[in-house]
Amino acid sequence: MSEHHVNIDAAPGATPDSDAAPVTDATAHDTVHLANGLSCSVPTGSPLAKLLKSQRTWVGPDAKARLKILRAAKSIAIVGASPNPARSSYFVGTYLKQSSDYRVYFVNPNAKTILGETAYPDLASLPEVPDIVDVFRRAGDIPAVIDEVLAIGVPTVWVQLGIWNQEAAEYGESQGLTVVMDRCIKIEHARFHGGLHLLGFDTGQITARKTIR
């Protein structure tokens, strides 16, 4: 297995534009893509899944750098935002609207409104170039999203917790993008601002301590 990508499978019936399944789902599996073109599904917490994740070589911004990104940003666009309250993108969008000062935009060509706001069909249709594009799409969709991000000049792409595409991350960085991957922007913002348990969505991934690591 010389090459692989690991990502949380989308929920059954999810469309390519819907967000990834909530990371708290006990049935979550990692889809492992092998170098020979085959793939298999393994439980997220299994030793094999942990081993594959440990073999990742790309390293994104550390905690201090992520804090700097979040503090500098004024606007965030959520690609793959869903109007479904059961989706993790809905939780994240709700949190960002209610617990931050960011201007929040939702991108989903299959929705008209999300959380009372206009849903835009693509990034090019937004009224401004956002500082961060937060992505809730399958791992295989990330390269296309990065191309959209580059086309409009967004400085940072943030790929949500449970989604990993190392080649896309490396490509984005080679084009001058700041890339954060496999991190929940809601958890990270709450971690730095003392609101880890607000609005639910407590994954147990980190503690409530404010220590920056």
Image: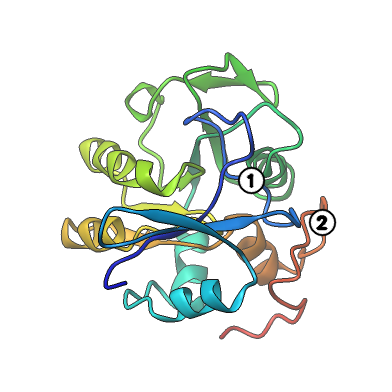
Question: Mark 1 — residue?
Answer: 21
- Is 82 left, or right, of 85 in this rendering? left
**Which of 9/173 is in front?**
9
Query: Disc 2 on helix, strand or loop?
Result: loop
Q: Amino acid at mark 2?
A: Leu
Q: Quadrant of the C terminus?
A: bottom right
Q: Amino acid at mark 1?
A: Ala
Against 52, residue 35 (above or below) is: above
Crowdedness near tag 2: few (<14), some (14–19) or many (≥20) residues, C-alpha within 10 Å: few
Against 195, residue 2 (above or below) is: below
**Which of 134/44 is in front?**
44
Residue sitting at x 53%, y 63%: 183
Question: Mark 2 — residue?
Answer: 198
Q: x, y percentage for residue 8?
A: 55, 54
Q: x, y percentage for residue 205?
A: 69, 72
Residue sitting at x 63%, y 41%: 89
Q: Residue furthest top?
A: 112
Q: x, y percentage for residue 38?
A: 34, 54
Residue sitting at x 21%, y 57%: 171
